[in-house]
Amino acid sequence: MTSKAIDQKIVELARSGKEIFLVNEKLMKKANPDLIIAQGICDVCSPYTTEVNKALDLFETKPDVLVLNPTSVSGILESIMQVARKVGRESEGERLVVSLRTRIQFIKAITHEEKRRVLCLEWLDPPFTAGHWVPEMVEMAGGVHGLSSKGESSRRMGFEEAVEFDPDLIALMPCGFNVSRTILESRLLASRKEWNSLRAVRDGNIYVVDSNSYFSKPGPRTITGLEILAKIVSPSKTQNIKVPGDSYTRLAIVSVKPRYTHRPGS
């Protein structure tokens, strides 16, 4: 099976809600890890206890296992420290966390005349509104994420909820996708009457972000995701904040069909 076919199969399984567990046993044995780090956040992509045990059965000497389950920005920072302690690098972990907290405080210190309503979609068909740490990130960036609560799981939503919320901005961040893949997937939304009635769509305030790198995985780069959201919510006040050039782009909409130009960082 080609890598493209494997990717497609994973997407199909994810949409169906079935569990996914892929392990290259040969590589695992060759790596012979002392520590396995897993996550228990997402029902689709997290390895459950039985799957972790399958991996452990590959080794004669059992490695240590650390399962991370952060649901907030502070939880992500604590997870960094958990890993640092496990690998004997606590001082390095503390320095990293201090630097990340400094970046967070810089974003939170930005003043906003008004709070813009932001809808973050973690999946497009069916639509899921992003949960866990994303609503908190939106709040830190100066926006209002009205369809999810901080710390709660992402959930399937009805388009009527989006119509009622009528967001000023929309960020498309399908779990595990980069910018180019999300642009292709955005075509799924173009024919929906409810989608085209939204203020953000009419005004062209739709942004595509690199979810795989900065939003769907809890870690140090999540703070870059916060900076990306701040640039989307308040572009005039965040010009001095630097983010990777391919981390987000604005999606231009014409009529009911998406037409896009990939202008990194615009």
Image (cartoon, rainbow, N blue to C red):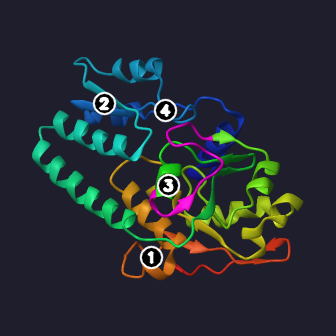
Query: Residue reaching furthest right?
Result: 193
Q: Are marks 3 and 1 in contact (CB under 8 Å)?
A: no
Label at residue 212: 3
Neighbours of disc 1 within 10 Å: few (<14), some (14-19), many (20+): few
Q: Amino acid at mark 2?
A: Lys
Label at residue 46: 4
Extent of the magenta region: 140-154
Q: Secondary structure at mark 2?
A: helix
What is the chief secondary structure element of the magenta stretch?
A: loop
Residue 54 occupies quadrant: top left
Which mark is first along the chain, 2 or 1? 2
Q: Are marks 4 and 1 in contact (CB under 8 Å)?
A: no
Question: Which residue corresponds to mark 1?
Answer: 245
Q: Secondary structure at mark 3?
A: helix
Question: What is the quadrant of the N terminus in the image?
Answer: top right
- Residue 247 drawn in magenta: no
Q: Amino acid at mark 3?
A: Asn
